[in-house]
Image (cartoon, rainbow, N blue to C red):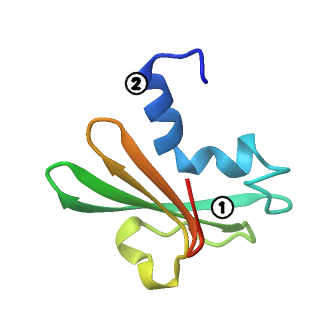
Amino acid sequence: MWSVSLPRAVENQLDVFHLPFVHYNTIGRGGGKTLVHGPLVKVLDDYSFIIYPFNEVDRGQRPLRGNEIDASRLRNYLWFIYPNVWENYISRNMRL
């Protein structure tokens, strides 16, 4: 249980881009400087959308815009359904 308001909890879950910075030694590990691309957001309908995080080691390359990211290469996503349902798709056999 989190001792925060519902909007704050939803905001935390939807901010997938904070992972390499806040959780650098667990779920966001990447080793060193991290480049965050996007965001790539796919709107499904009036009540739901998917956010695809795409991070990689920063080697001086330019960050990609959302429309430059190939979603077929990405294996993780966050599916949000208004007002307060989200599914963190980690792998084919693991979802939160």
Q: Residue furthest left?
A: 46
> Which secondary structure lies at badge 2?
helix
Residue 28 picture quarter? bottom right
Mark 2 residue type: Pro
Mark 1 residue type: Leu
Residue 70 can be seen in this image: no
Q: Nearer the viewer, residue 24 or 48?
A: 48
Label 2 crowd bin: few (<14), some (14–19), many (20+), radius 10 Å: few
Residue position for label 2: 7
Which of discs 2 and 1 lies nearer the camera? The answer is: 2
User: Where residue 20 sits: x, y (%)?
Assistant: 71, 52
User: Where residue 8 sits: x, y (%)?
Assistant: 47, 24
> Which secondary structure lies at badge 1?
strand
The residue located at (44%, 76%) in the rendering is 69
Residue 32 vs 6, above or below: the answer is below
Residue position for label 1: 35
Left or right: where 95 falls relative to 87: right
Q: Nearer the viewer, residue 46 or 17?
A: 46
Labels 2 & 1 near each other (Cβ < 8 A): no
Residue 45 vs 80, above or below: the answer is below
| Sequence-earlier tag: 2 or 1 | 2
User: Where residue 2 sits: x, y (%)?
Assistant: 60, 22
Quadrant of the snapshot with the N terminus: top right
Q: Nearer the viewer, residue 70 or 78?
A: 78
Label 1 crowd bin: few (<14), some (14–19), many (20+), radius 10 Å: many
The residue located at (74%, 68%) in the rendering is 57
Left or right: where 28 falls relative to 68: right
The residue located at (71%, 69%) in the rendering is 60
